[in-house]
Image (spheres, rainbow, N blue to C red):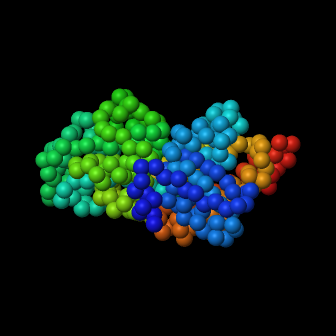
């Protein structure tokens, strides 16, 4: 089921019923697989449906600002100034990892090693062949073909791109100076794909391709991932344990709107491109019932969604953070009269 969902160029989760309380959301493709799984289980448990459009973080931010959905989703946390300006609150829903994926003849999943500076040089077009000396030096004993490298990146405004480019900017001075980081950047080379789904599809289709996707997309589409060297110089394979390690030292309380960025973090077992997916809601809820239903969905997911998250190699939010989120709901979400909706 999920393989079919994830292989498409765009994805829309539709879980609808006849109830007026059905909720709508739009944004990040990074968490789409787990939101789909949660929605299926939540509908079975409560009868309430969810329509989630997997359109990218940038589009999700635009839609929640325009009030065309009940919640937006972004993998790039908004700064306090923007949250205040738009009257939004932000809370973390799930964590996971971004991985580099390749389509290279003779290279098996997890066999190839990559570093931030090496990825930066590939994405800047400085390294164009798979048997280049820089790649070969990092991967002695791996038979690398003399094939062209095709860079695949996101074509839309993307939180996954933010995480990937933020990691490159932290590890490559040349990347930081020439490209920088953000949900959209001016790519030096390559072809674009819409959503994690589109990048995964392009990497599958193009021989010699390299891309970056959320780990669940790599697994479900049977893409060949690479190892990645972290800040401590350790070459790691992606897993929920290394994603958890990256999140262990996050200082949630010091960040406005829980806005932490878990790239290039300390720790020998920390995956260097770990991300947090955030939910955006208006502090003043024009439809208090809809606001309540959004909160009920994520509260249920926090309490019941950990097994599904583990199955898809996401990392559930720590209990201490969930408590802070629940307190933030009570303090920030009001109806039109100023009364707390919870």
Task: State whether residue 86 appears in this view.
Answer: yes
Image x and y of residue 185, in percent:
42, 33
Image x and y of residue 231, in percent:
38, 49
- The one nearer the camera, 179 or 293, is 293
User: Viewed as shown, does residue 138 lie left or right of 328?
Assistant: left
Image x and y of residue 67, in percent:
68, 40
Q: Quadrant of residue 186?
A: top left
Q: How many marks?
A: 0
208 up-or-down from 58: above or below: below
- The one nearer the camera, 105 or 90, is 105
Quadrant, the C terminus: bottom right
64 up-or-down from 340: above or below: above
User: Viewed as shown, does residue 341 lie left or right of 299?
Assistant: right
Task: State whether residue 246 appears in this view.
Answer: no
Image x and y of residue 74, in percent:
55, 45
Residue at (77% x, 47% y) in the render: 287
- The one nearer the camera, 307 or 321, is 307
Residue at (18% x, 59% y) in the render: 106
User: Viewed as shown, does residue 185 lie left or right of 134?
Assistant: right
Which residue is outermost to the front? 18
Residue at (41% x, 39% y) in the render: 155
Q: Quadrant of residue 190?
A: top left
Quadrant, the N terminus: bottom left
User: Viewed as shown, does residue 207 lie left or right of 331?
Assistant: left
Residue at (13% x, 47% y) in the render: 146
64 up-or-down from 10: above or below: above
């Amino acid at each position: 089921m999920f393989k079919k969902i994830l292989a498409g160029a765009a994805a829309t989760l539709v879980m609808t019923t006849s109830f007026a309380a059905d909720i709508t959301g739009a944004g990040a493709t990074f968490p789409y697989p787990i939101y789909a799984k949660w929605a299926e289980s939540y509908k079975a448990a409560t009868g309430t449906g969810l329509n989630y459009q997997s359109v990218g973080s940038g589009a999700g931010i635009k839609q929640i600002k325009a009030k065309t959905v009940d919640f937006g989703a972004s993998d790039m946390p908004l700064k306090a100034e923007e949250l205040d300006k738009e009257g939004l609150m932000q809370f973390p829903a799930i964590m996971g990892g971004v991985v580099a994926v390749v389509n290279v003849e003779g290279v098996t999943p997890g066999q190839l090693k990559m570093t931030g500076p090496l990825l930066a040089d590939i994405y800047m077009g400085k390294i164009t062949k798979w048997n280049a000396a820089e790649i070969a030096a990092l991967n002695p004993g791996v038979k690398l073909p003399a094939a062209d490298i095709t860079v695949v990146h996101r074509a839309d405004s993307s939180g996954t791109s933010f995480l990937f480019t933020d990691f490159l900017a932290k590890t490559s001075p040349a990347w930081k100076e020439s490209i920088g980081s953000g949900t959209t950047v001016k790519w030096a080379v390559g072809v674009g794909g819409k959503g994690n789904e589109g990048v995964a599809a392009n990497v599958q289709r193009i021989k010699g391709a390299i891309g970056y996707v959320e780990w669940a997309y790599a697994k479900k589409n049977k893409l060949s991932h690479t190892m990645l060297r972290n800040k401590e110089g350790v070459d790691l394979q992606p897993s929920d344990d290394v994603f958890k390690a990256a999140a262990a030292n996050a200082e949630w309380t010091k960040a406005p709107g829980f806005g932490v960025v878990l790239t290039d973090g300390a720790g020998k077992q920390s995956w260097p491109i770990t991300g947090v997916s955030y939910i955006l809601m208006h502090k003043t809820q024009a439809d208090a019932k809809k606001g309540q239903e959004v909160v009920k969905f994520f509260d249920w997911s926090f309490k019941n969604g950990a097994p599904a998250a583990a199955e898809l190699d996401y990392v559930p939010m720590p209990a201490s953070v969930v408590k802070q989120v629940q307190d933030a709901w009570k303090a920030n979400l009001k109806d039109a009269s100023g009364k707390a909706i919870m």
